[in-house]
Image: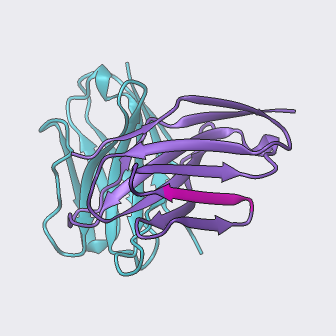
């Protein structure tokens, strides 16, 4: 079955870059997602990448994918205090009709002013 | 446009009672998902509806859990004879099913079983 792993905690200073890492195990083609969850709120989709891509950039967000190592990262440039939240990596295998997401445990990002 | 909505936002119930949680997906989205977020288990898939197909119930943790989706839109998740371990945030998501299948989440219902 699928498994997604993330580190639990990251602390950065305001203005620095943040890099949140994720590893996954599913070998079939898949979409990979990053979601953000603020306290008491649902999941907000940040960005996604298909597994035949190496990189995707969207404003302050850069997603890098290493298919060989099944390693995904999310880089947030110029991190702000409003970026403090839990970030979830998730995958959705294409070879299943279900498309249900398998989530990592989430990385809590703390931004120090 | 309106996103996914869920009600109630919070629900406190006594052990043994039944509860119903509601989800209104984004208009036009044919796929609807229920997930559960709890401290011990993280985010877990529960059930998936796609159009008129039979739902995928493979994630439901016990037969006390059931869900239906009427008219291909609104969905209700029912938990019978609630137990304390059912306490969690129940999240609903919907997707268009045609393009990227990106799932958009509602704000969740926080269920507390006393």
Residue ID at (48%, 69%):
A53
Residue A92 percent coordinates (x, y): 34, 59
In the rendered image of the structure, the colour used to display chain A is purple
Which of the image's four quarters has the N terminus of chain B?
bottom right
- In this rendering, position of residue B64 left or right of residue B15: left
Q: Chain B hue?
A: cyan
In the visual, does A75 lie left or right of B106? right
Residue occupying the point 32% across, 69% down: B31
Q: In which quarter of the image is residue B81?
A: top left
Residue for point 25% across, 35% down: B18
Callout count: 0
Considering depth in this image, is A56 or B49 the residue closer to the camera? A56
The stretch of residues the image draws in magenta is A60-65
Q: Is residue B23 above or below residue B113?
A: below
Q: Is residue B9 magenta?
A: no
Query: At which x and y percent is residue A50?
Result: 43, 68
């Amino acid at each position: 079955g699928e498994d997604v792993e993330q580190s639990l905690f990251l602390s950065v200073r305001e203005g620095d870059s943040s890099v949140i890492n994720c590893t996954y195990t599913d070998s079939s083609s898949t979409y990979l997602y990053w979601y953000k969850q603020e306290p008491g709120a649902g999941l907000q989709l940040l960005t996604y990448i298909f597994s035949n891509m190496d990189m995707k950039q969207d404003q302050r967000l850069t997603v890098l994918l290493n298919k060989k190592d099944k390693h995904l990262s999310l880089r947030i440039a110029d991190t702000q205090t409003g970026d403090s939240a839990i970030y979830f990596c998730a995958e959705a295998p294409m070879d299943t009709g279900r498309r249900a997401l398998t989530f990592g445990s989430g990385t809590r990002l703390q931004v120090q002013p | 446009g309106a996103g996914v909505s869920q009600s109630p936002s919070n629900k406190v119930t006594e052990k043994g009672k039944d509860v119903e949680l509601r989800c209104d997906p984004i208009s036009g989205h044919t796929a609807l998902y229920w997930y559960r977020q709890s401290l011990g288990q993280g985010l877990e898939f529960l059930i998936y509806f796609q159009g008129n197909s039979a739902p995928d119930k493979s994630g439901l943790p016990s037969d006390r859990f059931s869900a239906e989706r009427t008219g291909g839109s609104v969905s209700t998740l029912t938990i019978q004879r609630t137990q304390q371990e059912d306490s969690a945030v129940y999240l609903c998501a919907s997707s268009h099913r045609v393009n990227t299948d990106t799932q958009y989440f509602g704000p969740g219902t926080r269920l507390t079983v006393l």
